[in-house]
Image (cartoon, rainbow, N blue to C red):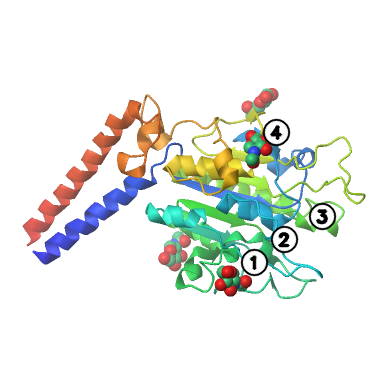
Amino acid sequence: MFKLASTLTLVLAATAATAASKGKWFDSVGIIMSENEDFWLTTQQAPYQALVAQGLLTTNYFGLSHVSEQNYAAIITGVLDPNIYRGDASTPANLNITYPTILEQLKAKGLTYKQYTESYPGGCYQADMYPDNPSGALYYKRHSPFNMISSLRGTPECLTAIGTYDDFANDVANGTLPNYFWIIPNDLHNTHTADTTPNPFADANPWTATEGPKWLAAAQKANALFINTWDESRCDNTAKYPCGTHLDQQIATVLWGPMVQKNATDNKYWNHFSIARTIEENWGLTPLGAGDKNATAFDFLLPNPSTNSPSGGSGSTSPRNGGSASASSSASLSKASMGLNFLGALGLMAGILVVL
Ligand SMILES: *[C@@H]1O[C@H](CO)[C@@H](O)[C@H](O)[C@H]1NC(C)=O
Ligand SMILES: *[C@@H]1O[C@H](CO)[C@@H](O)[C@H](O)[C@H]1NC(C)=O
Ligand SMILES: *[C@@H]1O[C@H](CO)[C@@H](O)[C@H](O)[C@H]1NC(C)=O
Ligand SMILES: *[C@@H]1O[C@H](CO)[C@@H](O)[C@H](O)[C@H]1NC(C)=O
């Protein structure tokens, strides 16, 4: 009987986890973070245009800081903190996020997360770069948000939560893409190399051309929203990087997945806090800091396609998941599917009883 009871508990737990991952718009979200490039130049690149053709381009989206790491940290904490800084001759390094992050909120809801980090050696690597040599480094801690989180550092969990980019293909193939993930391209593929090459997209374009179709397919398979954005613009109105006729901090951000219109644009104002707020509203998470509290969620996403709800997927978050103000119209459908899951669990129990 004990065995039976614990089996039932496991089955019910699995059922609950499935219900929890069904968000208002998506079941999974991935942020692909590139580096230091302007809207006008990014949108001229053919591999990028191929993504835009399958998704939505925001034409009025802005970075928050001209210090890379502050943009990454803002998306996971809702806080724009000038003290998050790689350090220089007069300032001690502080790549150490000590605020609450969205990871704790996700975990509390039974949602999963992971960072896919290109050119990362694994093993909770601590140093600021890898290889640990400024002339050959491809991975940088300051571009690797999970590695900056104090509560994750040095824990057993960071061995699995911070993976390599190879893990991404494995997880897609195995159907184990987490609910929340980041893809961190290396410093050749994230357009950061512009300082040393004449064409900032020389390394990134072939990589995006190869990986882009995989990202598009993964979004369909996992009912995932993918967001490719840049941390900040290259131009910053300094003598070295004048903005000219372009806007300081305007960056290209493209989104795709089954909940996104194809070949579309949106011209409302958005920034990195909009990403945080959208993810929070998707699963009924509480906003964390001044930035995401003040932001609004992307209003162009379509209802979650995986709920099969004719009146909209906003009720897909079950009541236990917090739900949202507009959840009433399809709440009954959501309950119906939970009922089916419960019947499935009963059926499994009956099967176990027969075996016993
Ligand atoms: C990060 O901050 C925490 C809390 O203040 C501190 O205990 C820890 O030593 C810091 N870690 C690093 C690497 O600075
Ligand atoms: C599935 O995941 C396992 C690890 O759990 C891994 O060894 C295997 O390569 C993955 N399969 C595919 C097709 O990637
Ligand atoms: C995308 O939209 C533009 C107009 O905004 C149109 O000219 C173009 O043909 C569309 N492309 C596809 C592939 O639908
Ligand atoms: C709140 O967001 C708006 C943009 O939507 C911005 O103009 C304003 O400065 C923000 N306020 C705070 C306190 O962050």
Given contact means CB atoms under 8 Å apart, are the residues at marks 4 and 1 in contact?
no
Q: Which residue is mark 4?
A: 60
Q: Which residue is mark 3?
A: 194
Please identify the residue farthest to the right as the structure is shown: 239
Q: Which of the 4 quarters of the picture holds residue 182? A: bottom right
Indicate the secondary structure of the residue bearing disc 1. Answer: loop
Identify the amino acid type marked 2: Asp
Give left or right: position of 323 versus 31: left
Q: Nearer the viewer, mark 4 or mark 1?
A: 4
**Residue 133 image position (x, y, % from top left):** 76, 75
**Residue 15 image position (x, y, % from top left):** 27, 49
Lower position in the chain sequence, tag 3 or tag 4: 4
Q: Give the Cα distance between marks 1 and 2.
A: 9 Å
Q: Give the Cα distance between marks 3 and 4.
A: 23 Å
Q: Which residue is mark 2?
A: 187
Q: Which mark is residue 119?
A: 1
Lower position in the chain sequence, tag 4 or tag 1: 4
Quadrant of image for the N terminus: bottom left
Identify the amino acid type marked 3: Ala
Identified at 66% across, 46% down, the residue is 229
Q: Give the Cα distance between marks 3 and 1.
A: 18 Å
Lower position in the chain sequence, tag 3 or tag 1: 1
Q: Which mark is residue 329?
A: none
Given contact means CB atoms under 8 Å apart, are the residues at marks 3 and 1 in contact?
no
**Ligand 1 image-quadrant field:** bottom right
Q: Give the Cα distance between marks 4 and 1.
A: 32 Å
